[in-house]
Image (spheres, rainbow, N blue to C red):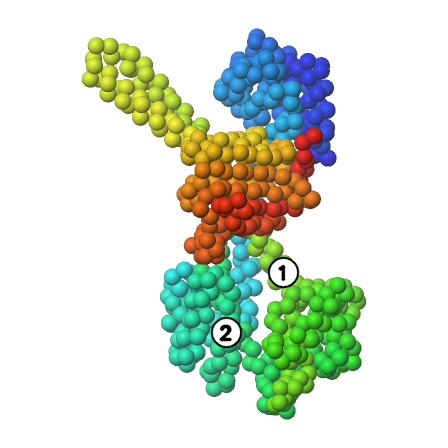
Amino acid sequence: MRGTLRILGVGLSEADAQLVSDELRRAGYAPELTQTGSPREMLAALEREGWDVILYACDRADCGVIEAVRLFKATSCDVPFIVLTHEATQELAAAAVKEGAYDYIALENPRRLPVTVGAEIERAEIRRERESARRALAESEAKYRSVVDNSADTIARVDLNGRFLFVNRTFRQLAHMREEDLIGDGPELIQFAFAPDVYGRMVEAVARAMQEQTQTEVELPFTDAAGNEVCILQTAYPWYNAEGEFGGVEILGRNITDLKRLQDRDKRAAARQAAGDAVASMIDGVAVLDAEGTITEANPALADIHGYGSAADLVGKPFLQCVGTEEADKVMAKLRETASTENGPIRDLETVSVRKDGSTFPAMLNISSLRDAQGRVMAGIVVVRDITEAKRAQEQLRQLAVRLQNAREEERERVSQEIHDELGQTLTVVRLGLDWLTGKLAGQDRLRAKAQSMMELAAGAIQKVKQISTELRPAMLSHAGLVPALEWHLKEFEHNTGISSEFETEIEGDSFDNTVSLALFRIFQEALTNVARHAEATRLRVSLHLREGMLRLEVADNGKGIAEASVQSFESFGLLGMKERAAAVGGQFHVEPNPGGGTLVSVSIPADQAEGGKPRA
């Protein structure tokens, strides 16, 4: 139930009032309709109390709707003014919208009413929540930075030019440098900490991650300040900004010295002793397993993570007892895999672990085998890390990215409205003034020609304002819904490019969640832009379907197609942006060759993410 909706009706017939109330109730509202009979009575009602929406009946030519809109605009009321019309009076209703009415809805098809009303109410709520969202964003960013800065791992971020954007405290301690000395410069500042060949491998792995936009790993041995031989596992992976654009590489360095010692095949006794010392002090849980998967040794951290009193309580228990039932087969398969001589260690295996009390938590497993000098497996080593907080932080970052995107869309909408209302109206007045001036310059051909030229410039500027306003935030999407907005944009695309197009759907475009609709529309815009710029196509087919629990948008062209290298290239910012928009609403994005030739772009979103989407009857 969406709650009470206070409606001020003006001139509604009993039948129309009943139709409006029934339609709003079906949408989950509890309408309270108060009737008035004239524009003046409407003004009096507006002065007496507050309303959520005004519904004005435009059922005849003398209904007074134009006068009512003008009177309403003279007030300071921020209430949606919607004209209810019939087929015979739609032209008058359209004129009322030009005067300043919010929208008009034909009562022969009233399904748009709940969405139109709801959109304006949500817009007000968004304005109120904006400041709160910004404060929450700042707090979350500070919390995230604190977690990262205090990590035991070295963490750094470099931009596309290889310059440091961020380094955490552990990284600064390793480099023996201050943050201000590192930010803005490249990795060459820290090469003194590594042997030349090790430093070269480190830079090569980062460059590969940058070029291929893929995760790379490399083990880097070096001697620390105390003269100890240390091994760092460096993981470099691409990062993307809130717009989904590739921004550079993040570098994570984890000290795996103790684990490397555990895996030393030639020093069994020394490795086991080192493992005992190192494992006992590790914050991650460590289990040593026999050939049957039974725990023979465990460190205190493993007992803490799984809720046992001491490490001894775990000895003799099967390790799978610490794993969720649905994950047991997967983990056992990985344990066997590491025991094979053909396979190395398994890193960063996400699973569900079980505490002694039966509660579960997300965990990351690193599985390896301890072998003797002949390569025979002596024991299995499992390192368990509780990633509950990491998962929560990851979800918070995703939500922050969505909030940032929503904030940008809200700002685009505000700027679009201001450009349309302020600049557009000003240019219209200028054009009218020039038109009047031209009429007063009869017989003055030079001045008249100059005024006419200026009037044409003003007319062109008005059209450009409309174009910019529409590109920033198409009003069609908010007012009419997703399907009409897609159809309208496709027609504009066909008109501007000459590429013939067709649109297929059985879905009503006014029934989707606003965030989903906006994400699909922006992806659709980018897809059409790519077709116009690169495809060399002559035909375009667009379809939107809700089938088997999935909402799917497809854009297929008959152009020259897209190379796999272009799909994977870090310069394909448009494709990356579409992928991130789809992911933000729980969907998946794909670009692939079209079976009929050309390129097929598709977005699939679970139906439960697109609230209320229903096929047409």
Q: Looking at the picture, which amino acid does disc 2 mark?
A: Val
Query: Is residue 204 visible in the rendered structure shown here?
Result: yes
The residue that appears at 32% across and 14% down in the rendered structure is: 436
Furthest toward the top, the residue is 62
- Binning the other alpha carbons within 10 Å of mark 1 as few (below 14), some (14 to 19) or many (20 upward) gives few
- Residue 329 screen position, x and y as percent: 73, 68
Q: Quadrant of residue 316?
A: bottom right
Which structural element holds mark 1? Answer: helix
For the residue pair 578 and 426, the one nearer the viewer reads as: 578
Q: Earlier in the sequence, mark 2 or mark 1?
A: 2
- Residue 250 screen position, x and y as percent: 48, 64
Query: In the image, is residue 65 above or below residue 4?
Result: above
Q: Looking at the picture, which amino acid does disc 1 mark?
A: Lys
Query: In the image, is residue 92 above or below residue 531?
Result: above
User: In the figure, is residue 18 to the left or right of 236?
Assistant: right
Query: In the image, is residue 265 above or below residue 393?
Result: below
The residue that appears at 55% across and 34% down in the rendered structure is: 503
Distance between the Cα atoms at labels 2 and 1? 25 Å
For the N terminus, give its image quadrant.
top right
Count numbered badges in the picture.
2
Query: In the image, is residue 1 above or below residue 277?
Result: above
The residue that appears at 66% across and 15% down in the rendered structure is: 12
For the C terminus, give its image quadrant.
top right
Disc marking residue 511:
none
Q: Quadrant of residue 206?
A: bottom left
- Residue 413 screen position, x and y as percent: 49, 36
The residue that label 2 is drawn on is: 218
Query: Is residue 168 visible in the rendered structure shown here?
Result: no
The residue that label 1 is drawn on is: 391
- Binning the other alpha carbons within 10 Å of mark 2 as few (below 14), some (14 to 19) or many (20 upward) gives some
- Residue 130 screen position, x and y as percent: 55, 42
